[in-house]
Amino acid sequence: MATATTAGAAARAPAAVSVRSPWRDAWRRLRKNRMAVAMGAIFLAICGFCFLGPIVAGWFGLDATTIRIDRGATAPSWAHPFGTDLLGRDMLVRTMIGGRIAILVAFTATAIALVIGVTWGAIAAYAGGRVDYVMMRVVDALYGFPTVVFVIVVMAVFDTKSIVVLFALIGGISWLNMARQTRGQVLSLRHREFVEAARAVGARPGRILFRHIVPNALGVIIVAATASLPSVMLTEAFLSFLGLGVQAPMASWGTLVSEGSTQISVYVWVLVAPGVVMGLTIMALNFLGDGLRDALDPQTRKD
């Protein structure tokens, strides 16, 4: 009788429900987005092309600095798949090295912007009141200032073209949008139950903010960071195009495009090679950012 009762109770017990973590759910949604996955794979391939390619090219005697005036600008061939520039330098390896600089600038400047923007926006939202008002008015004021002009003025005043200064300046002007998005997310989280529970046990405001609230806003932060990468890359390319970015003998996609634009009527390949790779990278990052937004935005989770 007891056995029958136990069996009946077990039959009436609700089946265990498997709980999926939000990150696993986001990963599942991202994998369904074939375009985002394909663009992510293309971006990883470009990173391998830029960081490992020069090493492989060196095995075949190709580098980015050897000048061959006697060879000059030659069209793409088996020996030089992207051709050579006016000084006889191999455009394939120069494009790879330029990609290294462009990608490093994008990720370094975005990391700087991430730290500044997340900290600024989170503190403003959590503090609220006059602190929030003053901090966000500073962001509004900086939004109205032409950022590229700011970089040009600073580099001219200090008479420097250091790549480290370039990294810092681009990062220092790229945090405004991230601060706004972080603020909006923190405002929606600061009165949630887990925050009130942390306050009830006596957690300090700094711990509540950076150990409880900000980690729950990581989805929006990751999307904002991914979306800022193409913008930072274009800013670096524009500054290098103006001659304020990477200096010779180093090269970035911006400097290569600048050099190629003066020769496009005669030597088309000098512009096409770095331009196509840079455009493909920016397109891949944009599609990947859209995919991450769709995967991590709770408002799009209908399945």
Image (cartoon, helix red, strand yellow):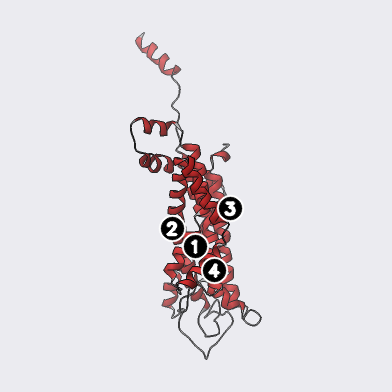
Q: Could you tell me how far apart the alpha carbons at marks 4 and 1 are, in whole angstroms?
A: 21 Å
Q: Could you tell me how far apart the alpha carbons at marks 4 and 2 are, in whole angstroms?
A: 18 Å
Which residue is labeled 4 in the image?
A: 237
As drawn, the label of residue 112 is 2
Amino acid on which the number 4 mark rests in the picture: Ala
Residue drawn at 49 percent across, 55 percent down: 175
Q: Is residue 37 left or right of residue 202?
A: right
Q: Could you tell me how far apart the alpha carbons at marks 3 and 4 are, in whole angstroms?
A: 26 Å
Residue placed most toward the observer, 160 or 5: 160
Residue drawn at 43 percent across, 43 percent down: 214
Which residue is labeled 3 in the image?
A: 35
Amino acid on which the number 2 mark rests in the picture: Ile
Which callout, 3 or 4, points at the residue further toward the start of the chain?
A: 3
Which residue is labeled 1 in the image?
A: 45
> Mark 4, mark 2: which one is toward the viewer?
2
**Residue 298, relative to residue 3: is it above or below?**
below
